Image (cartoon, helix red, strand yellow):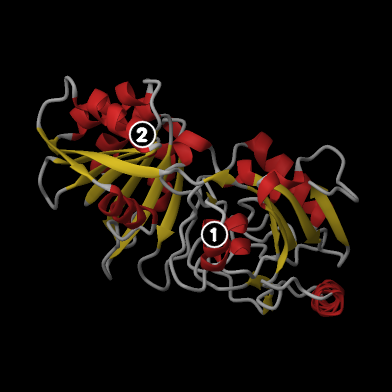
Amino acid sequence: MAKPTRSNRSAALEAIEVQVVEAEAAGTPVEITGGRTKAGLGRRDSLPRLDVSALDQLVSYEPGELVLVVQPGMRLSTVEELLAGENQHLAFEPPHWGEEATVGGTVACGLSGPRRFKVGAARDFVLGIELVDGRGQRFRAGGRVVKNVTGYDMSRALTGSFGTLGVLTEICLKLWPRPETQATLVVDGCDRVDALALMLAWAALPLEITGLAYLPEGGSPVGRLLARIEGPEPAVTAQLRRLVEGTAGSISEFGEAKSAHVWKQLRELELFQPGADEELWRFSLAPAHALRLVEQLEGHGLLRSGLDWGGGQVWALFPARVAASSLHQIALLLGATAWRFARGPEDANDEAFTPLSPGVHRLNQRLKQAMDPKGIFSPGRMYRPD
């Protein structure tokens, strides 16, 4: 795969810098965009687009160092194909949600898949970034530092900021070796109380369990518990045997191909697709509080729910126009965060994210002022502007 030439890369970057400078001078907010597979996340912004799709090249790849540097418009599928050739992967298992999914969109939205509870979040794999700020100035943070912003871990701050702090122009990622194989233990007929108890117990074992999820079966009070184990084949076989011991119920196993398929379905939210009059919400919290959360949500029109991340993530389907403020209040009382993932009616534009605490809000505003003083980058994407 060819690296971008200096002239082409410079021209694309200079074009972005010019657009930012012009937007700042005019006081015109813009929306940073690429493959647009994550455009539905957050609050709606009908803004002019600053498209970074032209920045789609490999900058450097050092398999021996487990480090990859790419431009933000590079497709996730292209990256995964490249890494597979060296038996490496993005361990945080980012979702695609479409063929046009890019690395920039993944980092900007801070998205992690089912393996997150075992290996960490997307932000833990971002070693460094290059960014154009709200003044049109370019700087680097983290790996390959040239200029930094004192007092902030900018690589982590930019991950999950939804393009509200600056334009990502280069991303340095930490890689992991690809597991030799995988298999999944399946326990059918569990209710969520028993399922969570098993997940909490299994997560505490010294095993390479890299996926723990509980899926509902239609309107039934019971569902399917999944536990994925990855590693060398003999170790996977032995660890599956250990999980089976002492586990009651209808037990089966998925081999490598079927296991990979079901976890891809989970990653891509294929098992939690909302209907035309439904909304999908994600709650992130301490696994021990998952059952109480679901019980609280049932009083607010909950249609269906499932658990991922060993109980640390709850997917919940509601009727369209569910009262977002009520869901956020429930989340706050349980120390959780709520995030509307898939919206209902086109006119729904209430708060998509749980409100920040006063202290975090002040820090967020200081960072926004430092990075984007005139507020030109999607000012209402995450929260209503002050």
Q: Quadrant of residue 237?
A: top left
How crowded is the residue under tag 1: few (<14 C-alpha within 10 Å), some, or many (20+)?
few
Q: Secondary structure at mark 2?
A: helix
Which of the image's four quarters has the C terminus?
Answer: bottom right
In the rendered image, is residue 302 in sight?
A: no
Q: Position of residue 149 (x, y in %)?
A: 86, 45
Q: Residue furthest front?
A: 234
Q: Nearer the viewer, mark 2 or mark 1?
A: 1
Residue 250, numbered circle: none
How crowded is the residue under tag 2: few (<14 C-alpha within 10 Å), some, or many (20+)?
many
The residue that label 1 is drawn on is 85
The residue that label 2 is drawn on is 310
Q: Position of residue 355 (x, y in %)?
A: 54, 44
Establish if 163 lies above or below 365: below
Establish if 171 lies above or below 57: above
Establish if 194 lies above or below 4: above
Q: CA distance from mark 2 to mark 1?
A: 30 Å
Q: Nearer the viewer, residue 208 or 353?
A: 208
Amino acid type at circle 1 is Gly
